Amino acid sequence: MTLFKICGLRDVDSAMIARECSASFLGFVFVPGVRRELSVEQVAEIVSDYRRLCGSGGPFLVGLFANQSPEFVNSAIEKCDLDFAQLCGDELADYYEKISARVIKQVKIPF
């Protein structure tokens, strides 16, 4: 089975459309300086509205992080009710154990 993630969501309407398109994961960017970066408060509001409209089933909710403290990542996971943390930076395996949600590690392949 192929799974796919729609990333960089910025509002509940986009999350609903991604769900209707059978996305497996919905991604919210917490990486500082990235064009689609959102605050914890913004994502918490989007997720609250999304869960109210859709219930608890459906795509997994993912936060994207890069080289941020485990404390920040875990706080965002808790406040935003996220299912996964996608790590996009230089985090090492011992860092993963400090994260309170399931971890997806972004792997960069040089060309």
Image: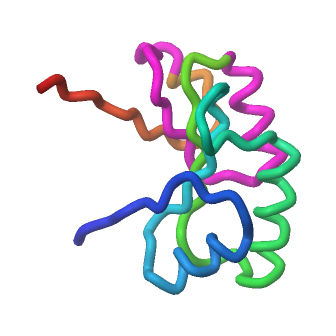
Image position of 86 with respect to 59: above or below:
above
Q: Which residue is drawn at 47% across and 16% down?
A: 91
Colour approach in the figure: rainbow
Q: Residue at x 45, y 72 (%)?
A: 23
Q: In which quarter of the image is the N terminus?
A: bottom left
Q: In this view, does 16 lie to the left or right of 79?
A: left
Q: Which of 55 and 34 is in front in this view?
A: 34
Q: Position of residue 3 (x, y in %)?
A: 32, 65
Q: Position of residue 71 (x, y in %)?
A: 75, 21
Query: Can you tell which quarter of the image residue 31 is in?
Result: top right
Query: Can you tell which quarter of the image residue 58 is in?
Result: bottom right
Q: Position of residue 44 (x, y in %)?
A: 83, 53
Image position of 81 with respect to 92: above or below:
below
Q: Which of 76 and 97 is in front in this view?
A: 76
Q: Is residue 15 magenta?
A: no
Q: Which residue is drawn at 75% across and 25% down?
A: 72
Image position of 72 with respect to 80: above or below:
above
Q: Does the magenta stretch include residue 79?
A: yes
Q: Position of residue 82 (x, y in %)?
A: 67, 52
Q: In this view, does 59 lie to the left or right of 110?
A: right
Q: In which quarter of the image is the C terminus?
A: top left
Q: In this view, does 1 lie to the left or right of 47?
A: left
Q: Residue at x 66, y 36 (%)?
A: 30
Q: How many discs mark residues in the rendered view?
A: 0
Q: Which of 49 and 100 is in front in this view?
A: 49
The furthest residue to the left: 111
Q: Is residue 40 left or right of residue 1?
A: right
Image position of 48 with respect to 16: above or below:
above
Magenta segment: 69-95
